[in-house]
Amino acid sequence: MKELPGLKREHPEYKQVGSQVLRDVLERLEKAYKAFFRRVKNGETPGFPRFKSKDRYDSFTLKQAGWKWGLVPWDKSPSMGNI
């Protein structure tokens, strides 16, 4: 998670994406690799984590307490684009 500000500096396109959404992506990726290496260590079939293109990654998570959907206009959100 500490790398997130550096990634945003290196990749300007990430500045448009909320930090909570990017953090969730990093947490999912870390979870997938931890499970992979745990299976390798236990001698199980590892099942390498698959790349999820934009067509397969169809959700995001906002963990901040107090966020309400009604605060965002239905047609357009400045940070998320068209909803």
Image (tube, rainbow, N blue to C red):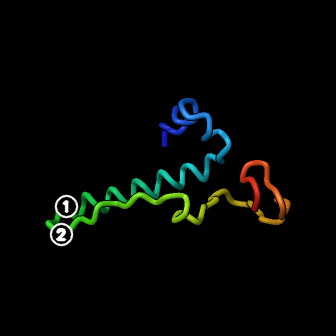
Residue 78 screen position, x and y as percent: 79, 49
From where the camera sits, is residue 20 visible? yes
Quadrant in the picture for residue 11? top right
Label 2 crowd (10 A; few <14 / some 14-19 / many >=20): few
User: Where does label 1 land, which residue?
Assistant: 40
Q: Residue at x 17, y 60 (%)?
A: 41
> Does residue 15 lie above or below 27 as drawn?
above
Residue 77 screen position, x and y as percent: 79, 54
Label 1 crowd (10 A; few <14 / some 14-19 / many >=20): some
| Three-letter amino acid code at the position of disc 1 | Val
Residue 36 screen position, x and y as percent: 28, 60
Q: Distance from label 2 to label 1 (Cα)?
A: 6 Å
Front residue of this view, candidates 61 and 13:
13
Q: Residue at x 57, y 30 (%)?
A: 9
> Along the horizontal axis of the image, is 60 left or right of 49?
right
> Along the horizontal axis of the image, is 24 left or right of 70?
left
